[in-house]
Structure formats: C-alpha cells, structure tokens
C-alpha cells in the first residue's frame, strides 16, 4: 500500500465518526428533509435524461418538448413488471380517452371518468359547488392527463374531506393516483388497475430547454410534496420516475396498502 493510500485509510474512520455525529444531532424531521432532497435530485437526473432524448428526436426547426407537464392519456398501457400484468378494465377505451366528465351516482358517489384534460379542475370545482353537499366519495376511472389539473382536483378532494375509490374493474393510471391520494379514506378493489409512469409533455412547446427543465423540476417537486403531505410513501413517486412513459408500473393490492396509497382493499362482489 502506498503512503498516500495509508493516509486515506487512516482518515476514513474520522470521517465516518463525524458523519455519525452529524446524523445523531439531526431530528427525524431533518432526515426526512434530506431524504426529500435526495428524491428531488434523482428526479432531476431522470428528467434531464428524458429532455436530452426528446431534443435529439425533435426536428431542428421545432421547439424542444418539455417533460413534466402532461402524461400520456392512453389507457391500458402494458405493464413494466412481468409479475404484475396489465388488466384491462370494464370501461371502453374510447370512454377513457374522452375528456374528464363528472356524474353524481347512487350513495353520494361522484364518478370521475375520462382523462384529466386541461380545464378539468375548473369543471370539477363547478360540479362540487353545485352538488358537493351530496358527495361522500369520489370514484375514479381515469387514464390520467394534465398533472396540474390532477393536483388541483386532488387538493379539492382533501379539502372537502371526501373519500376516494377505484371500484371493481376500475382503472386509475398516470396522474390519476394523485387524485386517489387526495381521499381521506382510499379504497381500491382487488381487481382494479392502478399504475404510474414518468410524466412528460404531450406536445412540443415553444419554450427553451432551460425553462422546460425548470418547469419539470417544479412540477416534479410539487407531486412529491403533495404525496408526502397526503401521508403516501414517496416510493410511489420513485416507481413513477423509473417507469418509461410507454408503460405503467401497476401496483399489487398489498403494495398499495403498504405504501399508503390505499387505506383498504375491497373484494369483488359475489
């Protein structure tokens, strides 16, 4: 071993001891803050990679695509997991591709079906202003859509104290699990499909790559913070950022409960 190597080894225990003291001096809240920052850094790396790929595929005369604004509004994407295959729901593909619609059905259930298109949050606010007093549970059947609208709807759900549910044969993917997380109580049918993937821009926007990355980081941090505020394990977001936009990470029933994305799993009716 060289002399320099010996000095490096000798200094190692001292550095480790200082690190242990640093951790011991920090309360749990500080450790959580650092963990959140770590998640954000990892998210930025993934988004930066995606942005580079998008720009390399964009014609020279076009503007760069901006990740982080809109997920795919394409239902029944394949599963990224071999052990958890995609399960087509009971709703037609056409119905899920349509813009989000809201319908008050039996037992105080407000059905949210279709993609969260830009403007869906305003329509949801108008709906609960008119019929909100009758609503107890928001039932989700959506392939996702506008992340900003999904976050706005999810916050309204929590503010109103509504429960959320993905019922038997239901489908909740991409940004839809943000709505699910907004519920005070969150029930998911055992045969329902709930999945996440990376958020990205659905169209080419005439803004710079720098502005696009700023927006991507802001929206990504907003999603992470929202899930933490709702009491959902941030591992949900990690699964989303690790999954390509062309696929979905579908959760098992046990995983949803363990990660606190669901508070209970319901069995199919006999």
Image (cartoon, rainbow, N blue to C red):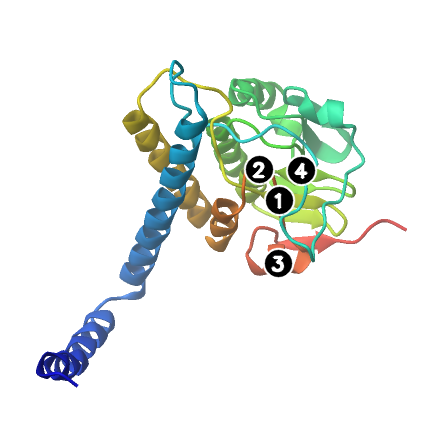
- Marks 1 and 3: in contact by CB < 8 Å? no
Q: Nearer the viewer, residue 42 or 89?
A: 42
Residue 39 on image: x %, y %: 37, 51
* Mark 3: few/some/many CA within 10 Å (<14, 14-19, 20+): few
Can you say whether 263 is above or below 165 in the image? below
Circle 4 SS class: loop
Q: Nearer the viewer, residue 265 or 85?
A: 85
Can you say whether 146 is above or below 155 in the image? above
> Which residue position holds label 3?
255
Rendered image quadrant of residue 60: top left
- Marks 1 and 2: in contact by CB < 8 Å? yes
Gap in angstroms between the C-alphas marked 3 and 4:
20 Å
> Which residue position holds label 4?
77
Frontmost of labels 1 and 4 is 4
> Which residue position holds label 1?
195
Can you say whether 234 is above or below 147 in the image? below
> Which residue position holds label 2?
174
Is residue 233 something that shows in the picture? no
Frontmost of labels 3 and 1 is 1
- Marks 4 and 1: in contact by CB < 8 Å? yes
Residue 2 on image: x %, y %: 13, 83
Name the residue: 24% across, 70% down.
Answer: 23
Circle 2 SS class: loop
- Marks 4 and 2: in contact by CB < 8 Å? no
């Amino acid at each position: 071993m060289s002399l320099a190597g010996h000095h490096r080894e000798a200094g190692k225990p001292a550095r480790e001891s200082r690190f242990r003291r640093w951790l011991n001096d920090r309360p749990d809240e500080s450790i959580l803050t650092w963990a959140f920052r770590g998640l954000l850094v990892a998210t930025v790396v993934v988004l930066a990679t995606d942005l580079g790929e998008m720009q390399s595929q964009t014609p020279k005369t076009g503007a760069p695509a901006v990740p982080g604004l809109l997920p795919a509004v394409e239902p029944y994407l394949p599963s990224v997991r071999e052990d958890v295959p995609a399960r087509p729901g009971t709703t037609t593909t056409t119905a899920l591709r349509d813009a989000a619609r809201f319908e008050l059905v039996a037992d105080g259930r407000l059905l949210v079906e279709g993609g969260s298109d830009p403007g869906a949050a305003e329509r949801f606010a108008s709906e609960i202003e008119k019929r909100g007093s009758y609503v107890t549970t928001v039932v989700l059947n959506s392939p996702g859509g506008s992340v900003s609208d999904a976050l706005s709807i999810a916050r309204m759900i929590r503010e109103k104290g509504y429960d959320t549910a993905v019922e038997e044969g239901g489908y909740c993917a991409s940004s839809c699990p943000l709505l699910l997380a907004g519920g005070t109580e969150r029930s998911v049918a055992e045969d329902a499909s709930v999945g996440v993937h990376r958020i990205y821009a659905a169209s080419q926007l005439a803004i710079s790559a720098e502005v696009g990355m700023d927006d991507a980081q802001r929206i990504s941090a907003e999603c992470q913070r929202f899930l933490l505020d709702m009491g959902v394990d941030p591992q949900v977001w990690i699964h989303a950022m690790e999954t390509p936009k062309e696929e979905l990470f579908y959760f098992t029933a046990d995983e949803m409960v363990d990660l606190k994305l669901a508070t209970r799993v319901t069995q199919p009716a006999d």
